[in-house]
Image (cartoon, rainbow, N blue to C red):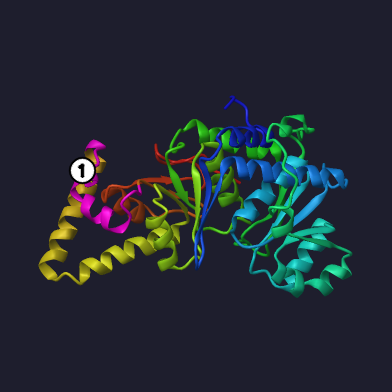
Amino acid sequence: MSAGWTISSLLQDLGARGQAPAIIAFSERSIVTWDCTTVATKAVGLAARLRAQSLGRGVPVVLWAPNIPSWIVAALGVLAAGAVLVPVDDLAEGAQLEAVLSRSESHLVLTTQQHQKESAKLLGQFEAESWLLDTVVGEGISPMSPDAAAAMLAPATTDPAALFWTSGTTGSPKAFFLTHGNIASNVKALRALAIVGPKDRALLPLPLHHAYPFIVGMLTTLTCGTAIVLPEGATGPLIMKALTDGEATAIIGVPRLYEALVAAIQSRVERRGKMFRLGWRGLLRLVIAVQHAAGLQPGSFLFDPIRRAIAPHLRYLVSGGARLERDTAETLAALGWIVLSGYGLPRRPRSLPATA
C-alpha cells in the first residue's frame, strides 16, 4: 500500500488481495466468510449506484443495522461515493432515529427488513427512502472491478466522511463530523505501528456505529490486511466462541471487556483452593515486579497454558473508548498478552494513537 491512505486506495488494495478473508462472521447456524475481492467489489458497486442517483458527495446516508458483513460493505461504499455516513445504533428506538434523521437531514436509510417495517411511518414523515442491505450489497448487484474505485472522484481530505455522536458522558450526546482527512491521519498512524498484518485476525465485538471500532476495528484492520471476526453477539459465550473458532490473534475491545476477562480468570483461580490461590497471587506479583524493573515479560511462558486454554491464538488486547485501569492492564500483560491502550494521550510506550 502507498504511503497515503484514502478510501479508494483501501478498496483497490482489498481487490488485489483476492480470496484472502476480509470478514468472518458468526451466526447461530453458520460461519460466513467474505473474501477481500468480494468486499471491494460490492462496496464499489454500491458507490457507483449512489453516484448514479446523485447520492454522492456531501449527501448524508444513514446506516442502521447490526454488525454484519453487509454493514461493513455499505459503510465502505458510502465513503467511496463521497457521501456522509451516518451510522445508527442497531438498538436505537423511534425517538433516537427521529433525532438522527432530523440532525443529519438524511433522506436515505440503508437498513434491514425488520427495521424497515418498524420505522415505515417515521421514514414517511421525513420523506426518507429505505434500501435493504441484502439488496444493495447482495448477489444481484452488477459486478464491477475494484480498480474502478480509482476512476471515481476521490473525496477531498476536508470533505465530511461520517457523522458520529459522543457517548454523552458530559451530558446529552453531541453530534460531530469526521472528515476524510481525520480518518486518514488515524489510519496512517496506526498502520505505521505494524501491530497486525495479513496473517492476523481481529475480533471486533463492539458496535460499529461508534468512531473507535469504526476507525480502529474496521478501517485500520482492513488496511493492514487483517481479517475482521464478528461474533454473533456481545455476550461472553458468543465472544469466546468467535475468539476460539475464529482463531483471532487480536481483540479490539473496551476496558469493561478486559475487566470481565480478568474477573473470569480470578474466579477460576478461586475455585482451585487456598494454596493454589496464594501461589498464583505471589507469582503474579513477581511477574509484575519484573516487568516494572527490567521491562521483561516472563508471563509469556510462565502462564502460556492459561492463555492457550482461554484463546490459543490470541496475542494482542487493544483497548479504547475509555481509560484502561493500570491494575487490569498490568495483570493482563503479566499473563503474557500484549496490551495496547489508545484512549486519551499516550502514557505508555505501547499506547496507540488516540482516535476521535
**Could one spot residue 303 in this view of the protein?**
yes
> Going 74% across and 74% down the picture, which residue do you hit?
118
As for residue 204 lying within the magenta part, the answer is no
Spot the residue most to the top: 3
Whole-percent x, y for residue 130 in the image = 80, 62
Quadrant of the rendered image containing residue 259? bottom left
**Residue 84: x and y, percent?**
76, 47
Q: Is residue 299 above or below residue 245?
A: above
- What SS does tag 1 mark? loop
In front here: 224 or 49?
A: 49
Q: On the picture, is 145 further left or further right than 48?
A: left
Q: Position of residue 165 (x, y in %)?
A: 68, 57
**Which residue shows up at 31% across the image and 52% down it?**
312
Residue 63 at least partly seen: no
Q: At 24% from the left edge and 45% from the top edge, which residue is drawn? A: 300
Where is mark 1, residue-wise? 298
- Horizontally, residue 269 falls left or right of residue 147, namely left
Residue 122 placed where, x, y %? 82, 72
Residue type, mark 1 in image: Pro
Relative to 317, say whether 145 is above or below: above
| Region rendered in magenta | 294-314
Q: Classify 10 Å Cα crowding around label 1: few (below 14), some (14-19), many (20 and above).
A: some
On-image quarter of the N terminus: top right
Left or right relative to 125: residue 253 = left
Give the mark count.
1
